[in-house]
Image (cartoon, rainbow, N blue to C red):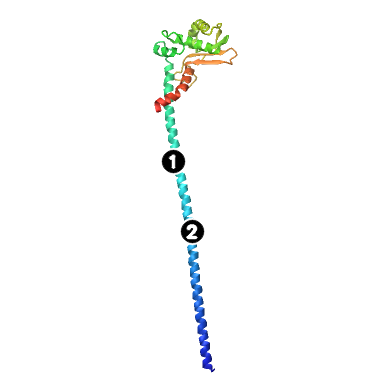
Amino acid sequence: MNDGDVSKQIQQMVTFIHQEAEEKANEISVCAEEEFNIEKLQLVEAEKKKIRQEYERKAKQVQVRKKIEYSMQLNASRIKFLQAQDDIVNAMKETASKELLRVSDDQNAYTYKKLLQAFSDDKNAYNYKKLLQALIVQSLLRLKESSVLLRCREMDKKVVESVLEDSKREYVEKANLRAPAITIDKVYLPPPPSGSEQHGPSCSGGVVIASQDGKIVCENTLDARLDVAFRQKLPQIRKHLFG
């Protein structure tokens, strides 16, 4: 084999090796491109998933905030509504409380008639004097003590003194017990409210009777009676006004 043949054979081998290397390089390049594309898609999908999760999380936060704000606004509206109802009911009570101040005026006979229907058997006689007597008798019947202490407004003292004996007799008839000893307390109930002291202690009338030891107290003032009636009738008042 001469040098030409050897050189030709070597050139063929070199060409073959180059061709095989190029094919291998192309194969590696294709595989690398495929792996790159797969990895890129995986990374893109992973990032898309993160973005979707973040969006869903923020969307839920927005929904929660909206629900909280709606609930707060709803509660605030309910509070305002209930406050408005309370204002109306309290205004009614305030009006009734002002009406009580007219009870000590003997000219308001209709009011006495309504009040005495709950206290007295005499439906035809009604004035503040009769009302005080009815309140005293009712308190005595509640306590049934042999000796009691009576507290009234200073302006009502003479009227109270004038009905004590009649009150005792009525008590004896109804309770079938001995007449109790009644002592008028030297500490008086507050006077009716005046224009200058609307929020101070006041009393529209009536009496407070207690046992001598002070352990049992029957508060039978007109204001106390109004409070009791108001609490008892409050459900009916609300139903009538607001349904």
Quadrant where the N terminus is found in the figure: bottom right
Q: To which residue does mark 1 refer?
A: 70
Q: Type of residue at label 2?
A: Glu
Answer whether residue 202 is visible to the viewer in this image: no
Q: Where is 199 relative to 25, above or below?
A: above
Q: In the depicted view, which residue is nearer to us: 193 or 25? A: 25
Residue at the front extreme of this rendering: 1
Is disc 2 in contact with disc 1, using a CB cutoff of under 8 Å?
A: no
Residue 10 picture location, percent across and down:
53, 88
Residue 15 picture location, percent across and down:
50, 84
Q: Type of residue at label 1?
A: Tyr
User: Mark 2 packing: few (<14 Cα in 10 Å), some, or many (20+)?
Assistant: few
The count of marks equals 2
Quadrant where the C terminus is found in the figure: top left
Q: To which residue does mark 2 refer?
A: 47
Q: In the depicted view, which residue is nearer to us: 21 or 88? A: 21
165 relative position to 85: left or right: right
Q: Where is 16 relative to 127, above or below?
A: below
